[in-house]
Amino acid sequence: KQEVTQIPAALSVPEGENLVLNCSFTDSAIYNLQWFRQDPGKGLTSLLLIQSSQREQTSGRLNASLDKSSGRSTLYIAASQPGDSATYLCAGPWRSEKLVFGKGTKLTVNP
Amino acid sequence: EAGVAQSPRYKIIEKRQSVAFWCNPISGHATLYWYQQILGQGPKLLIQFQNNGVVDDSQLPKDRFSAERLKGVDSTLKIQPAKLEDSAVYLCASSLDRQGTEAFFGQGTRLTVV
């Protein structure tokens, strides 16, 4: 059974700080890993998709890495801003194809 | 490019009533998913369609939940009768194909069962 764990569950940082969100999974046979952002009362916004053959992806101030052998992915946010405050979720499909999600990390960036 | 459309955004019903949610995926996306997200949890897959065929409905409570995808485009998720524990956000997502392609989500429908 594929399980995804995200630690910490909540994180509060001052504006301008660089930060790392962690995602771990139990099955290394992952097809890809996707990071999402969810604002309160809203749906999920796709941030980055890392294919299993890739090690990392970058978009603006965001950088996501994938290490299949250790069952880990990280989302690095540079120079955090109050607008980055949201819940960040990671998910991966395995052989069953469905996206299996972690519970998310709630990020608060304080001005 | 238009995103995934869902309606309604909010719904409040009494227990034992029925409710239906509608989803229109991104044009050309063959795969459509319905997820249930309970407060404080990550989304959980209810059902996955590939075109108009069901790929995975192993976690769909079939005694009360049903879903269909007509002509491989729009989809409807129905709950009948609703229970208090069905209170959640119901998210629809679509992707171009199955494995390895990016999934895009709608805004969700927040259901409250009282």
Image: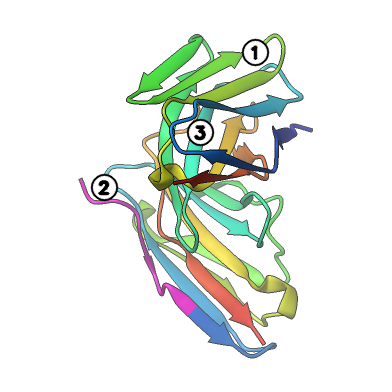
Task: Give the position of the N terminus of chain A as an image quadrant.
Answer: top right
Mark found first going from the N terminus, 3 or 1: 3
**Crowd class of label 2 (few under 14; some 14 to 19; many from 20; radius 10 Å):** some
Q: Which residues are magenta?
A: B1-10
Q: Residue type at mark 1?
A: Lys
Q: SS at mark 1?
A: loop
Do tags 3 and 1 sit on the same chain?
yes
Residue B70: x %, y % from top left:
39, 61
Mark sitting on residue A35:
3
Q: Residue type at mark 2?
A: Ser
Q: SS at mark 2?
A: loop
Q: What residue would you read off at disc 1?
A: A68
Q: Residue at x 58, y 35 (%)?
A: A90
- Residue found at the very far left of the displayed protein: B1
Q: Is residue B97 left or right of residue A32?
A: left
Residue A72: x %, y % from top left:
67, 19
Q: Residue type at mark 3?
A: Trp
Residue B47: x %, y % from top left:
59, 53
Instruction: Indicate yes or no whether the magenta region holds residue B95.
Output: no
Q: Chain of mark 3?
A: A
> Picture quarter containing residue A5?
top right
Do tags 1 and 2 sit on the same chain?
no
Mark 1 or mark 2, which is nearer to you?
A: 1
Q: What residue would you read off at disc 2?
A: B27
**Mark 1 to mark 2: distance in Å?**
32 Å
Q: Chain of mark 2?
A: B
Residue B100 visible, this angle = no
Instruction: Indicate yes or no whether the magenta region holds residue B7.
Output: yes
